[in-house]
Amino acid sequence: MPALELNDLDRRIWNEELNDFVPDKIFDAHTHIFRWAYNTDPDKDSGPLRNFVQPAFEDAGWKLLDECDELLMPGRQVERLSFPFPYSNGCDFDGSNEFIAGEVKGHPQSGALMLVHPAMTADDIESAVEQHGFLGLKPYRFFSSTGDFVHCRITDFLPEHQIAVADRLGLLIMMHLSKPDGISDPQNLDDLEFLTTQYPRARWILAHCARAYSSWPIERAGNRLREMPNTWFDTSSVCESDAIEALIRTVGIERVMYGSDDVPVGVLRGKYISFGYGWAYLSEQNHNFNLSHCDARMTFTRFEQLRAMKRAARATGLTDLQIEALFHDNAVSLIHGHC
Ligand SMILES: [Zn+2]
């Protein structure tokens, strides 16, 4: 059975709304390469992640990502920045990192990040980076040394000795911020201002529009975000155009990059929605709305994200060149220093 199939709804959205917007050359700055086997939780098959990582996506290697891109964005040439899946209830870090290094090896324009745990020493990280050629680090809040992955600070899951390694080696840091207010939380802003200044050679990518699924965290962060040195942003899984528009207006287009969050988020049918000061993933399976008045089917999260990017591009008046930069050139110049 193919991992993915398009239906008439998907085709119509692609043909009528997205095909003329998505450029030919893509650098996807946010992708996951992993195996379900590296989830070492003994109860994993009855846990919540099982719904998320369906059997068709258990072996998410380079080939699967290529297949998904060819189906969802036919004819596009895609390079990627990839990192493992952070299994929260038990994770084989070495297996995850070795696997991704092997998968990305034959693709010199692309790159991989190392999944890190706060208990890793500077030596652990330096030797893995040297051995596998990782371009940077992928910490995750679920591994916080405080055990509180909702309210933890950045250095609870990416301790300073690891940031010092990133600074010394000029590495990227893919940061999915914690805390309910995300980038507008004053402690996150204080910490980022301190860390980006103290360690100027580390280059931060603040994932999911700095984890803003609506505009309010970016608007609240305002000038502090605009002036934050050494920070870039990916649009992965953000499906509301106001968030992307606010990001472009606040930090400029040069530091914003397309990311798909594949797999599996980008290829799941559903959408991240925001309400009040919250957000959630809405799928065909997790609601009980009465939808008899409309076509109740959902399309891929990635298509909803691309629709939001298109609306934001229109609202901010991006030129074709700026749209190409958003989808490709900005990431290439961050990662390779040129485009
Ligand atoms: Zn992700």
Image (spheres, grey):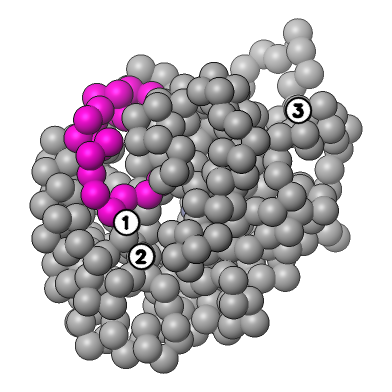
* Nearer to the camera, 263 or 108: 108
Q: Position of residue 137 (x, y in %)?
A: 35, 69
Split into 4 quadrants, where in the image is the N terminus? bottom right
Q: Position of residue 119 (x, y in %)?
A: 21, 75
Highlighted range, magenta: 215-233
Rendered image: mark on residue 204? 1
Circles 1, 3 touching at the beta carbon (< 8 Å): no
Location of residue 62 (image quadrant): bottom right
The amino acid on which the numbered mark 1 sits, given as a three-letter code, is Trp
**Above or below, comparing residue 220 to residue 123 in the picture:** above
Question: Can you identify the residue that label 2 sits on?
Answer: 172
* Nearer to the camera, 116 or 80: 80
Q: Residue at x 54, y 19 (%)?
A: 315
CA separation, marks 1 and 3? 32 Å
- Residue at the limit of the structure toward the right, as seen here: 8
Sooner in the amino-acid sequence: mark 2 or mark 3: 3
Q: Position of residue 282 (x, y in %)?
A: 56, 31
CA separation, marks 2 and 1? 6 Å
Q: Is residue 199 left or right of residue 64?
A: left
Question: Can you identify the residue that label 3 sits on?
Answer: 17
Location of residue 255 (image quadrant): top left
Circles 2, 1 touching at the beta carbon (< 8 Å): yes
The amino acid on which the numbered mark 2 sits, given as a three-letter code, is Leu
Q: Position of residue 60 (x, y in %)?
A: 63, 67
Q: Does residue 112 belong to the magenta stretch?
A: no
- Residue at the limit of the structure toward the top, as seen here: 293
Query: Can you see residue 160?
Result: yes
